[in-house]
Amino acid sequence: MVLIVVVDRDGYKDSYDGSVDLIDSIYYATVTLTTTGYGDITPVTPTARLVNAFIVTPLRISFLVVLVGTTLEVLANEGRRIMRDTRWRKRMKDHTIVVGYGTKGRAAVQTLISNGVKRDSIVVIDPRAQAIGDAGNDQMAAFHGDATNRTVLRRAEVMTAREVIVTTDRDDSAVLVTLAVRQLNANAHVVVAVREEDNVPLLRQSGADAVVTSSEAVGRLLGLSAVSPNLGEVMEDLLTYGEGLEVAERPVLGREVGKPPSAVPDRVVSVVRDGKVHRYYDSNVSVLAAGDKLIVVRPAKETPWAERPGADEDDE
């Protein structure tokens, strides 16, 4: 529009000095498109008036459409977000919050889903827009923000969460997130991934129930692979869900009560009784009891125990 006025500047009249230059053209375009229109610069020739009628006016309308449309879009999106959050909060309870949706976070989510956790009970928190988009594409609720901020944790309903998995990129951030979670929810089971072994005691003191040292775990796997490639391959297979073998936890079935761990069809590694883990050869768990849980090695494609034929309420 500035170019149009400059080219046809003789068709306009400035009430101040009678002539229109480049600065006057910029000024006229600004006040005209924003519909301010002080009237100090006006088109006086038929050509200039026709240009204003058929070119400038549509530009002015387009400007208003873009301005109003953008404002309404922002308000509508915010309104939908608020309504969606409200509906989500009403039904969300005993859910799992995953802080950080990078490589570790996605692997943790995939493991949860492989073990029967529903997607709609998993909530992702991440400060990266790309990660939030990935979580949304994976059909999970996601909140954009820093989990060290208690406001973000409250939006994710951490107060009613059953479990929180922290997979931040920095150990200091993991500590802050753990402290914030513990301040808002003293009962949630908190699992944290850290890079350095020296930070494990600090995480436990901050309230973490379980701490996984990623760098040390990778180092051990590398060492096993160097000592015995076959052993390293088996360990990697156990840690990978979806193929080969997997490590899983399941309750003792009714027909297994009273039997030794060796009599169970699955390869029992440990028995969990009263919250304490016992190795399968421990004399304290020589006979399985109702309420025990088994840590087993099984084929990855094996049907979860709750979906097996005959797994009725008595088995539970």
Image (cartoon, rainbow, N blue to C red):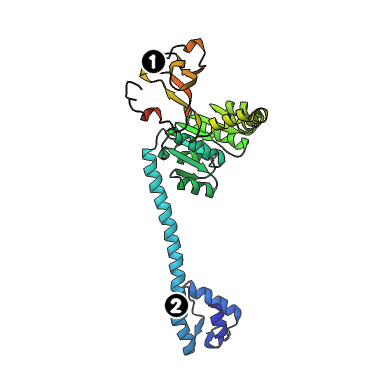
Check the image and name the residue furthest to the front.
230
In the rendered image, the vertical position of residue 259 relative to residue 40, given as above or below: above
In percent of width and height, residue 147 lies at: 53, 40
Q: Which residue is mark 1?
A: 257
Which amino acid type is shown beneath numbered disc 1?
Val
**Pick the front one: 54 or 138:** 138
User: For the residue labelled by badge 2, is the local secondary structure a helix, a strand or a loop?
Assistant: helix
Counting other residues with Cα less than 10 Å from the Cα at mark 1, is it few (<14), some (14-19), or many (20 or more)? some
- Per the rendering, the mark at residue 82 is none
Which residue occupies 50% across, 16% down? 280
User: For the residue labelled by badge 1, is the local secondary structure a helix, a strand or a loop?
Assistant: loop
Between disc 1 and disc 2, whose residue precedes? Answer: 2
**Pick the front one: 67 or 313:** 313
- Per the rendering, the mark at residue 57 is 2
**Pick the front one: 153 or 92:** 92
In percent of width and height, residue 227 lies at: 67, 27
Q: Quadrant of the C terminus?
A: top left
